[in-house]
Amino acid sequence: MPFIKVWIHFVWATKSRKPLLTKSIKEKLIQHIKENAKSKDIFINEINGDKDHIHILVSLGASQSISKIAHLLKGESSNWINKNKLTKQNFEWQDEYFAVSVSESQHKIIKKYIQNQESHHKKKSFSEEYKEFLDKYEFTI
């Protein structure tokens, strides 16, 4: 059995960054994503978000890929929201997402950052955060 510890920090937003994730919806969504991930052997270490996006810290398994995890969690969760009519309009995630590796030494810092999303976004919008991610990780669009 391989011993692997590769942390991936995922971030994805609602389509057009619409603030559809009310507190009630977000709580249900997070619980559902956790249950769905567990059923697919995806280990979520932390998950949280704000009105228009979500952060998930995942420990990548030996046979898992970043794109497969994103596809399984994003696609299934949007279908679940629509099936359960949690939003008045059709719910979609944006196509793109962030996925960056997290070193073991930064794991607890990222976990705490994800836990504190609500207070974090009282000081900084997701748009500002998005631009910082692009700069910090040198993504080009």
Image (tube, rainbow, N blue to C red):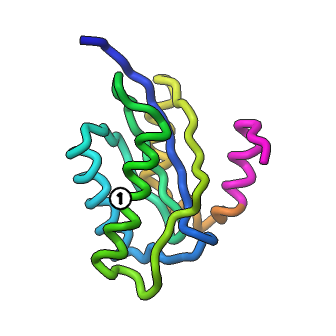
Q: Report x, y in % for residue 68.
A: 43, 40
The quarter in which the N terminus is drawn is: top left
Q: Residue at x 45, y 30 (%)?
A: 7
Q: Residue at x 31, y 68 (%)?
A: 80
- Give above or below for 13 relative to 72: below
Q: Secondary structure at mark 1?
A: helix
Report the residue marked by disc 1: 76
Count of marks placed on residues = 1
Classified by dominant secondary structure, the portion drawn in magenta counts as helix
The local crowd at label 1, few if under 14, some if 14 to 19, many if 20 or more residues have their Cα within 10 Å, is some
The amino acid pointed to by label 1 is: Glu
In the rendered image, residue 109 lying in the magenta stretch gets the answer no
Q: Report x, y in % for residue 111.
A: 44, 42
In the rendered image, residue 136 lying in the magenta stretch gets the answer yes
Q: Report x, y in % for residue 2.
A: 30, 12
- Give above or below for 16 relative to 86: above
Question: Is residue 50 toward the left or the right of residue 26 in the image?
Answer: right
Question: Is residue 11 toward the left or the right of residue 69 in the image?
Answer: right
Q: Report x, y in % for residue 126.
A: 63, 62
Q: Residue at x 48, y 52 (%)?
A: 55
Residue positioned most to the bottom:
88
Which region shows up in magenta?
Answer: 128-141
Q: Nearer the viewer, residue 56 or 42?
A: 42
